[in-house]
């Protein structure tokens, strides 16, 4: 079963309120978000970039799990600040579409 952004945001809120006891404060969650993004970056630069994993390190690190951790904390911050990520994403897509409708097509660095 697929989960919408709205459903996921609600699921995280329910989990926090029943299992997690309460939300960490917003600044703590910002710090946690930075940590999780750093973990994604570590995996990406080793898997797709020029750095290499240490012996046995790659098996311990799952990109999908780290990306899910980033989403989790984003949902927490959105819930704490009263933001619907579903609505925010739709508005952001509209903004980018209007702003960038021709921008990337003319970029010789990405079109071949």
Image: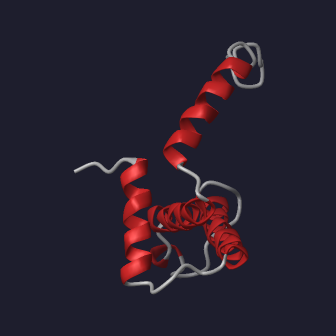
Q: Residue at x 77, y 19 (%)?
A: 107
Q: Is residue 85 visible?
A: yes
Q: Quadrant of the C terminus?
A: top right
User: As displayed, is residue 86 above or below residue 66?
Assistant: above
Front residue of 15 and 53: 15
Q: Which residue is most to the front?
A: 82
Quadrant of res 103: top right
Q: Which residue is most to the left?
A: 1
Image location of residue 5, percent across then percent down: 43, 49
Q: Is residue 104 visible?
A: no
User: As displayed, is residue 110 above or below residue 22?
Assistant: above
Front residue of 8 and 32: 8
Image location of residue 100, percent across then percent down: 71, 21
Quadrant of res 80: bottom right
Q: Which residue is drawn at 61% across and 65% down?
A: 77
Q: Which residue is drawn at 47% across and 63% down?
A: 68
Q: Residue at x 36, y 81 (%)?
A: 18
Image location of residue 51, percent across then percent down: 70, 65
The image shows a total of numbered marks equal to 0
Front residue of 67 and 45: 67
Quadrant of res 21: bottom left
Q: Which colour scheme is used?
A: secondary structure
Horizontal arrangement in the rendering, residue 100 relative to residue 58 (left or right): right
Horizontal arrangement in the rendering, residue 61 relative to residue 52 (left or right): left
Image location of residue 22, percent across then percent down: 51, 83
């Amino acid at each position: 079963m697929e989960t919408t952004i709205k459903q996921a945001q609600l699921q995280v809120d329910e989990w926090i309120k029943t299992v997690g006891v309460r939300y960490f404060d917003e600044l703590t969650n910002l710090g946690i978000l930075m940590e999780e993004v750093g973990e994604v970056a570590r995996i990406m630069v080793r898997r797709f970039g020029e750095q290499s994993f240490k012996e046995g390190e790659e098996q311990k690190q799952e990109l999908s799990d780290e990306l899910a951790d980033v989403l989790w904390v984003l949902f927490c911050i959105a819930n704490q600040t009263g933001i619907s990520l579903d609505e925010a994403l739709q508005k952001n897509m509209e903004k980018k579409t209007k702003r960038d409708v021709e921008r990337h097509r003319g970029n010789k660095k990405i079109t071949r």
